[in-house]
Image: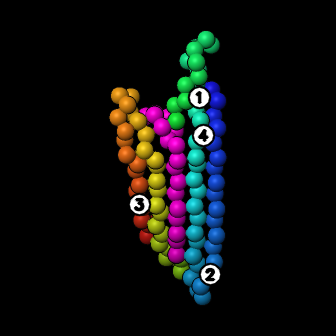
Amino acid sequence: MHVEGVDLIAAYHFDVGADRVDLAANGSYMFGFEQQVTPTSANVNEVGLVNFPVRFRGRATAAWSRERLTTGVALNYASAYHDLAGQRIKSDPTVDLQLR
């Protein structure tokens, strides 16, 4: 197996009076995820196939806090991929909300 990709992460926080704001983002981009089923078979790049890593996956978050109250939102994204029949499965953006 041979895997190539890059992962990035960034985070920042700042205060606004008694409030705290946290921002963060992370992402992974896969260049290749090659497997060789047998010692004599060719390497097959399986990025973007069902049950294997998608080409790009990321998450961006924002949170606001004051004393014991925190609220946040996160945007998640997974790029399109193909199922075993070769059909394209569209990208999958989702949103998470949180109140504590």
Q: CA distance from mark 2 to mark 1?
A: 45 Å
SS for dot 1: strand
Task: Provide the residue designation for mark 4.
Answer: 31
Question: Which mark is first along the chain, 3 or 2?
Answer: 2
Instruction: For marks 3 and 1, give the one nearer the viewer.
Output: 1
Residue corresponding to mark 2: 15
**Badge nearest the viewer, 4 or 2:** 4
Circle on res. 34:
1
10 Å neighbourhood of mark 2: few (<14), some, or many (≥20)?
Answer: few
Estimate the spatial distance between the alpha carbons at disc 2 and disc 3, rounded to whole Å: 25 Å
Q: Quadrant of residue 25?
A: bottom right
- Of tags 2 and 3, which is closer to the observer? 3
Please say if 97 is above or below 4.
Answer: below
**SS assignment at label 2:** strand
Q: Is residue 89 visible?
A: yes
Q: Secondary structure at mark 4?
A: strand
Image height check: is 87 above or below 78? above
The quarter holding residue 3 reads top right
Q: Earlier in the sequence, mark 4 or mark 2?
A: 2
Q: Could you say whether the residue bearing mark 3 is in a helix, strand or loop?
A: strand
Q: Please provide the residue range marked out in magenta.
A: 48-64
Up/down of 65 relative to 55, above or below: below
Q: Quadrant of the N terminus?
A: top right
What's under tag 3, amino acid-wise?
A: Val
CA distance for labels 4 and 3: 26 Å
Give residue 40's position: percent from left, percent from top: 61, 11
